[in-house]
Structure formats: structure tokens, C-alpha cells
Amino acid sequence: MKVFNLALCIFIFMGIFGAASLFSYDFNDFHSKYDTMFQNMSDSRMISNYLASDDPDMVISALKRVGALKITDVKKVVEALFAASTPSANQGKAVQRTSYDNLFNLSALVLGVIGDDSDGQIISSYFNDAADPASKVYLLRSMGNLSNSSTALSALNNFALKVDMMTDSRVVNELVNSIVLHNSKSSIGPLLEMSRSAPTSTRDGIDSAISILSKRGNDDTGTGTNG
């Protein structure tokens, strides 16, 4: 089922939206001078120790390796990195902004790989705090990857109800992709509402997602929207 859902996501993003992007919105977007050092590292304890480094580049490489190896033991550490690098936590720190943005976006992606239902709440709570559309896309991608999280699905459905003509099309596209990854019929109503208010260029993709979920979505209960 997971493979099937992923195929649907790729179909919608590439076949319907077909939007060119400078980012792949995955671990490959993040680079540091230590990447080669970490490339074949498999000692989870050693990798975990590097997450406490004062060098942001070292932390970036360690985070990527945590995600690649799905080291769940360090979830609390990654959650702490995510919270410490949020935009609201670093207002006025213009010089370090790029480093904080990279840590925020990457730690969100890693939590999407190693996290659980509680992380759906943590990640979604910072969605409005992220002014940069790229950061919103990373957060949505993470919530889509938490496809067993009812909390993440509920947040995604609620975000769909808040989309309007001014919402960045990249954000709309990723929101639809992430909703489809959850493969729940509870998303059909929010997607219908979304299709009425979203940018015109995204509506074919939204309609295709509705069709897919209508035919193949799971009949979930209790994972809809929170008022």
C-alpha cells in the first residue's frame, strides 16, 4: 500500500502539476563540507554525537545520515533541533538565517522519516510560522511522509480549507501530494473546498487527487478536520 501511495504522489506531482523547481525537497537539497565523511558512516552512536556539534555543517551532514539510516533513537534530539531553528525562535539573527533555515527544513524532513504521530502535531504547529514557501513545502512533505499519523492528516485537511488564490502554487501542489500519500477519503471534502479557492493553475491536480481518493482511498474515521 505504501508503494502504491507513493506512485500516486509522483503521478500527481510530475504528470499533473509538472512544475519545474530548483529544489527536489528532499535530503539532496542540503549540502555541507562534511558530506563525504558521513557518506558511509553507519555507527548510529557516532552519528548521534555529531548532532551536538557547534558546527552547523556538521549537524547538517549528521541529520542527513540520521534520515538515510532512519535512526529513531535520536528523535528527541531532532525534535529539539527543529524547535531551536524555527523562524520565531531566531528573529533578528540575520547573519545565521541560512543556517537556521537549513536546520529547520532538514530536521522537519528527518522527523517525517523517523517520527510518529506526535510529530505530526509538532511539525504542523510551525506551518504558519514559516513565511518562506519553500519551508512550507518541506513541512508538508514531512507530514505527507508521516502517512500513519492521524494528527498529520488532520492538519493537512485543515490546511486545505485555508488555501486561497494568493497561496503559492508550490505549497498547494505539495499539500495535494501529501494528502494523497495518506490515501484517506476523509480528505475529499477539504480538497473539494480547496478546488474552489486555489490558484487556477493547480485545480487540475486537485481534481485528479479527488478522483483518486474517491476510487481508492481508505474509509478512515476520526482523521478528518478539527474545527
Image (tube, helix red, strand yellow):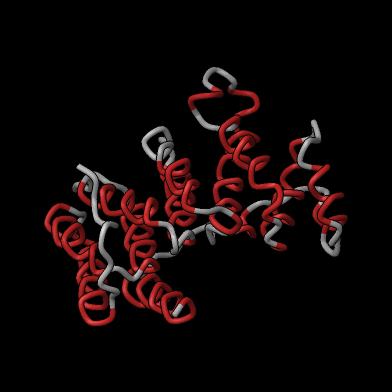
Q: Residue at (44%, 80%) from the top-left corner?
A: 1
**Image point (61%, 53%), residue name:** 110
Q: Quadrant of residue 185?
A: bottom left
Q: Is residue 27 left or right of residue 14?
A: right
- Residue 69 x/y as whole percent: 72, 63
State the residue at coordinates (44%, 63%). 147
Residue sticking out furthest to the top? 92
Task: Please provide percent x and percent y for residue 150.
Answer: 37, 56
Q: Position of residue 74 (x, y in %)?
A: 70, 47
Give the camera-side residue of 162 and 172: 162
Question: What quarter of the picture does the C terminus occupy?
Answer: top left
**Looking at this rendering, what residue extends furthest in the front direction?**
221
Q: Is residue 40 left or right of residue 102?
A: right
Q: What is the total number of numbered labels drawn onto the structure image?
A: 0
Residue at left offset 47%, top offset 52%:
117
> Residue 23: image x %, image y %?
53, 57
Question: Does residue 173 appear to the left or right of 187 in the view shown?
Answer: right
